[in-house]
């Protein structure tokens, strides 16, 4: 994973009310929650700053009304934020003119929507080709590219179906194909799987992982489902009442929740798939770690992967880094406590 | 539900807090104004001297508009003339095609105008729209130049070709082709059943011997509908785009919708004269608002995900509108078209009063001469046409998106079009040998007009002995006292009561709006008595509508077996133009107040039935189950659970009923009355626009006041019940 920031969001505000701009000015661009409540304004997004790194999956999570959908719409300019900056390719997206914005959306951005947003009067092929059609691309060319996308999401053979003839999962595949048709740099997904049945949802998540392994896009993904977030995310940002409470890797979130709100989410997280051996091991006291031969586990391995091996062993199991140097040990107690313990993991 | 419960706790007698105070105030208001009017005469009857000359001013304004208005040399009259001429052209073409046929003299103009357009429609996909548009413009420019200046014979080519072939006249579409066309269209949209239905109904027009009149009516419909649709679409889009436009246009639509059809005719006649085109203009103006409303609704109800996906696909605002928003709201837009078609047909009959030809003209004539047999058949023809157009447009609107866009390719994708072209060519060829293919032979017409007349005469001889006493009894002992009561009411009482009710239901702004409108439009302009007579007719009819409609609605909600035929009947009844309802009423009751009430009743009961049915049907199953579990008898369930919960919905139905009743009062003026409707009717031949417009607005005001009060009440009640 690279660490170049592809999008930099700085101090984004989105306030609803009679005169949001005037309100912001009166409070020097930094109103408190009390200011908002006192004057009857609603702070959908409050002073949010974060970077999206090149090629990562950044998941923004929160309950309904937390501002997660608003923030993605501020970045894509579907809603205009009240204040802030969104830097992309060295310029502020929020200052882009309508025509520049249309151009950026035609070439750089793709977006998937919760209830698909398909055009009911067009076939699958025509829906996927739509972003190319509005660019006035030649019909043969755009249908060729649309067909590639349809094959990519596994809907080959159904290109002449209408949306109403497809299941929910298939419709969202169309939505995904359409958002990828312009080969965007950044891919926005707004609760893409929330409208689907649990089984289909799991299937689509796997499909999403498969696609991302091939495409390596920069992704901003919105969800309210913590399990989904931990399954897919490189990093998770948790939002509450319009503020970004914590932004870090899933493991950090489980290990060091910033506050009770995050801890509440983290408590029900599938620790076996999030926490790595390195986090629960007893650190080796040796200054210069030696190489280990025989049974050991990798430091990056998740608890779920190593649990059986550790529990079946009577002695503590050595934990090694990628090159095989000893970092520490894990034993039955530590694994059991990490998996089933009520309080802190370590 | 919770708030209702706590409210009951506060004031045990009623579920609305302070309702008792309302009745006390109401009684006080009535006593006060009535006593006051006993002492002060001018509080009872608005003095003659205080009547402002609003009508006269309006009449003067329209006369000025017609005779003198203009900017410099360009007189307003020139503008209206040009508009008339412009609208006359497509109407002429429709008539040529449908029933008149094209004479050699007219052929070149029509050929050169239409052939390039047809070419454009067929070829624009292959060669690109822009190139084709340029080509069309070029052809038009060349032929126009040839006609006016060069005269090389190119322009006259179609005519000379015709002469050379020895053809004197191109015949109109043979009736067989139009009947087959209705069938083919029906099959394309809805399958075999609709095909047979459409072809059958249209074919029957010929069988009745009303083909030519039907086609006259149809050509007005055919031309008015596109105009009204395009106009409505444009206005609707504008309203959704601009807040200022919305602020002006939306209330205008409210008034336009509440104003009866006939009121539109008066100013149109003044400005455009009498004839086909003015009738069409009035029709277009009248039929356009529903399209605009549907456009606004359609655009506003497109899901935000679809809109946003369009924007994220990189649509420009124009692409978003034409490629995303409008196609996604296709269904609502098509329902708008459906309404436009139905309004057009309803108006076409009324427009015959200012010279629209065709079925409406014939029907009006028959009614005035009391040739009821003929009137029944002409009415039936209008109904058949209305029902076919309604079914076709409804079916088109209700099909799933993309259903008609066939997946087949090549000629199969357009087999219906090819079939129609094939039938047309075949019919023209056959017509050379068998004349009956072209014109339905007179000998085969089959009319029941005389039989109906005969039967009616026989019926009236005996039945009137029984009907007359009943009619007289109801008129003398019920209607006339009721009427006298309305006429006795002091104006101050009426306005006071309305104002107070408006205050309780909607606040001070509603009070100002309603009382202001009544004062300005009805009282001060000197229409009070006619207004009260209108109110009396409408109130009598609406009371009966509720007494009949609500129980039928309840019955339908009780029995699925009853519901289907009742709702189907309601659907069909609503497609009848209002005029039709006069026929049976005159047949049975002759003229008089009771006939008016019954005609209004027949026209306006449907919403009361439908909304009662829907209101009860929409109550959540669990509420009903809970009341059964609580041990209610069916009757208790109806009175204590279903009706109270459904009441807001039922009131909205009654609101609709009032609107339709008001519209119908203008129509019943034809069979004699002395209300506002009659004022409009009398203003027509004298072109007294002030009189007609103020009377029309008066009816609109009654409607708007009723609408505001009922809507405010229903909204409040729904909020209390927690229903959306």
Image (spheres, coloured by chain):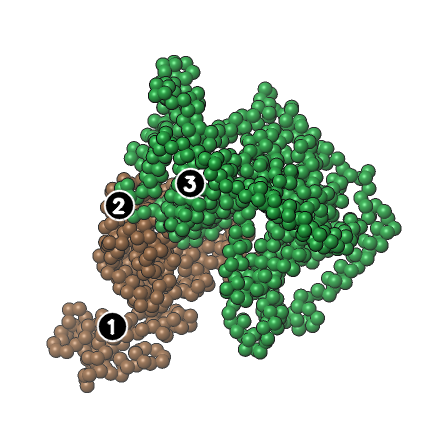
Rendered shade, chain B: green
Q: Which residue is mark 2?
A: A143
CA gap between label 2 and label 1 equals: 44 Å
Question: Badge 3: how crowded within 10 Å, few (<14), some, or many (20+)?
Answer: many
Task: Kindly identify which chain the residue marked by label 2 belongs to.
Answer: A
Q: Secondary structure at mark 3?
A: helix
Q: Tell me, for residue B478, which label it has, or none.
A: none
Across and down, in percent, residue B302 comes to: 44, 51
From the rendered image, report the letter of the chain displayed in brown: A
Q: In this rendering, would A108 be left or right of A241?
A: left
Residues at marks 2 and 1, common chain?
A: yes
- Residue B668 can be seen in this image: yes
Q: Which residue is mark 3?
A: B179
Task: Kindly identify which chain the residue marked by label 1 belongs to.
Answer: A
Q: Secondary structure at mark 1?
A: loop
CA gap between label 1 and label 3 equals: 76 Å
The image quadrant where one finds the C terminus of chain B is bottom right
Q: Residue at x 38, y 58 (%)?
A: A114
């Amino acid at each position: 994973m690279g660490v170049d920031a592809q999008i930099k969001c700085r101090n984004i505000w989105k306030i609803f009310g009679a005169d949001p701009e005037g309100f912001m000015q009166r409070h020097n661009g930094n109103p408190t929650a009390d200011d908002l409540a006192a004057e009857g304004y609603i702070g959908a997004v409050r002073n949010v700053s974060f970077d999206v790194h090149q090629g990562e999956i950044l998941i923004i999570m929160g309950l309904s009304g937390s501002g997660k959908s608003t923030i993605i719409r501020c970045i894509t300019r579907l809603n205009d934020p009240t204040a802030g900056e969104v830097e992309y390719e060295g310029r502020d997206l929020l200052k882009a003119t309508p025509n520049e914005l249309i151009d950026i959306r035609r070439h750089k951005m793709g977006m998937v929507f919760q209830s698909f947003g398909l055009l009911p009067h067009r076939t699958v092929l025509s829906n996927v080709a739509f972003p190319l059609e509005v660019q006035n691309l030649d019909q043969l060319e755009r249908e060729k590219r649309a067909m590639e996308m349809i094959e990519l999401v596994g809907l080959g053979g159904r290109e002449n179906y209408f949306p109403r003839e497809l299941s929910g999962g298939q419709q969202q595949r169309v939505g995904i194909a359409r958002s990828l048709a312009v080969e965007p740099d950044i891919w926005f997904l707004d609760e893409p799987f929330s409208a689907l049945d649990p089984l289909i949802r799991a299937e689509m998540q796997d499909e999403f992982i498969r696609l991302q392994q091939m495409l390596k896009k920069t992704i901003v993904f919105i969800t309210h489902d913590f399990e989904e977030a931990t399954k897919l995310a490189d990093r998770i940002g948790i939002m509450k009442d319009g503020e970004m409470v914590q932004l870090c890797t899933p493991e950090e979130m489980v290990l060091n929740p910033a506050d009770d709100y995050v801890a509440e989410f983290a408590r029900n997280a599938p620790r076996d798939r999030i926490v790595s051996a390195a986090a629960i091991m007893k650190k080796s006291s040796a200054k210069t770690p030696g190489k280990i031969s025989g049974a050991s586990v990798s430091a990056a391995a998740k608890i779920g992967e190593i649990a059986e091996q550790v529990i079946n062993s009577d002695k503590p199991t050595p934990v090694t880094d990628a090159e095989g140097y000893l970092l520490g040990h894990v034993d039955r107690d530590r694994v059991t406590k990490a998996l089933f313990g009520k309080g802190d993991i370590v | 539900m919770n708030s209702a419960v706590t409210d009951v706790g506060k004031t045990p007698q009623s579920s609305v807090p302070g309702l008792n105070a309302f009745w006390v105030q109401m009684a006080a208001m009535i006593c006060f104004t009535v006593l006051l009017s006993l002492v002060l005469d001018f509080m009872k009857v608005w003095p003659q001297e205080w009547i402002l000359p609003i009508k006269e001013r309006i009449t003067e304004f329209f006369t000025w508009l017609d005779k003198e208005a203009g900017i410099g040399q360009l007189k307003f009259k020139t503008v209206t003339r040009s508009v008339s001429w412009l609208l006359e052209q497509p109407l002429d073409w429709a008539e040529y095609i449908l029933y008149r046929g094209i004479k050699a003299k007219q052929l070149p103009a029509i050929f050169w105008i239409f052939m390039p357009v047809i070419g454009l429609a067929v070829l624009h996909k292959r060669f690109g729209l822009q190139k084709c548009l340029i080509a069309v413009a070029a052809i038009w420019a060349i032929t126009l130049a040839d006609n006016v200046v060069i005269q090389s014979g190119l322009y006259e080519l179609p005519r000379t070709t015709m002469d050379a072939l020895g053809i004197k006249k191109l015949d109109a579409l043979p009736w067989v082709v139009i009947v087959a066309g209705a069938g083919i269209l029906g099959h394309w949209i809805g399958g075999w059943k609709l095909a047979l239905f459409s072809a059958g109904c249209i074919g029957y027009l010929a069988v009745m011997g009303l083909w030519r009149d039907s086609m006259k009516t149809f050509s007005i419909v055919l031309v008015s509908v596109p105009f009204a649709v395009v106009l409505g679409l444009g206005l609707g889009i504008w309203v959704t785009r601009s807040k200022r436009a919305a602020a002006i246009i939306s209330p205008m639509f409210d008034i336009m919708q509440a104003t009866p059809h006939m009121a539109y005719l008066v100013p149109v006649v003044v400005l455009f004269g009498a004839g086909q085109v003015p009738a069409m203009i009035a029709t277009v103006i009248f039929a356009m608002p529903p399209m605009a409303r549907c456009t606004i609704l359609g655009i506003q109800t497109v899901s935000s995900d679809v809109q946003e996906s369009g924007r994220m696909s990189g649509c420009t605002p124009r692409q978003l509108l034409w490629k995303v928003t409008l196609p996604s709201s296709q269904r609502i837009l098509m329902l708008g078209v459906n309404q436009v078609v139905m309004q057009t047909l309803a108006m076409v009959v009324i427009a015959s009063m200012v010279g629209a030809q065709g079925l409406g003209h014939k029907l009006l004539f028959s009614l005035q001469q009391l040739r009821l047999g003929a009137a029944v058949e002409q009415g039936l023809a209008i109904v058949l046409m209305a029902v076919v157009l309604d079914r076709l447009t409804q079916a088109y609107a209700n099909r799933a998106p993309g259903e008609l866009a066939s997946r087949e390719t090549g000629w199969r994708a357009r087999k219906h079009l090819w079939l129609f072209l094939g039938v047309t060519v075949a019919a023209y060829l056959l017509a050379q040998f068998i004349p009956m293919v072209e014109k339905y032979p007179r000998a085969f017409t089959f009319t029941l007009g005389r039989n109906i007349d005969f039967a009616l005469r026989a019926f009236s001889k005996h039945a009137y002995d029984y009907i007359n006493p009943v009619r007289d009894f109801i008129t003398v002992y019920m209607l006339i006292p009721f009427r006298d009561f309305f006429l006795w009411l002091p104006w101050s009482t009426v306005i006071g009561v309305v104002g107070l009710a408006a205050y309780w239901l909607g606040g001070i702004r509603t009070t100002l709006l309603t009382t202001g409108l009544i004062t300005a439009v009805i009282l001060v302009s000197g229409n009070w008595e006619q207004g009260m007579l209108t109110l009396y007719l409408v109130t009598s009819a609406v009371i009966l509508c509720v007494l009949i409609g609500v129980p039928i609605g309840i019955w339908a909600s009780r029995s699925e077996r009853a519901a289907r035929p009742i709702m189907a009947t309601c659907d069909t009844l609503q497609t009848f133009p209002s005029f039709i309802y006069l026929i049976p009423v005159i047949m049975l009751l002759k003229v008089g107040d009771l006939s008016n009430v019954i005609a209004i009743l027949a026209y306006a009961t449907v919403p009361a039935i439908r909304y009662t049915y829907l209101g009860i049907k929409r109550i959540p199953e669990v509420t009903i189950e809970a009341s059964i579990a609580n041990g209610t008898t069916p009757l208790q369930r109806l009175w204590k659970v279903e009706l109270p919960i459904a009441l807001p919905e039922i009131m909205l139905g009654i609101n609709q009923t009032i609107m339709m009743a008001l519209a119908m009062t203008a129509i019943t003026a034809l069979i004699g009355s002395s209300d506002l409707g009659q004022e409009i009717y009398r203003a027509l031949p004298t072109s007294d626009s002030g009189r007609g417009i103020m009377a029309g607005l008066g009816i609109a005001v009654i409607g708007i006041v009723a609408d505001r009060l009922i809507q405010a009440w229903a909204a409040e009640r729904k909020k209390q019940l927690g229903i959306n």
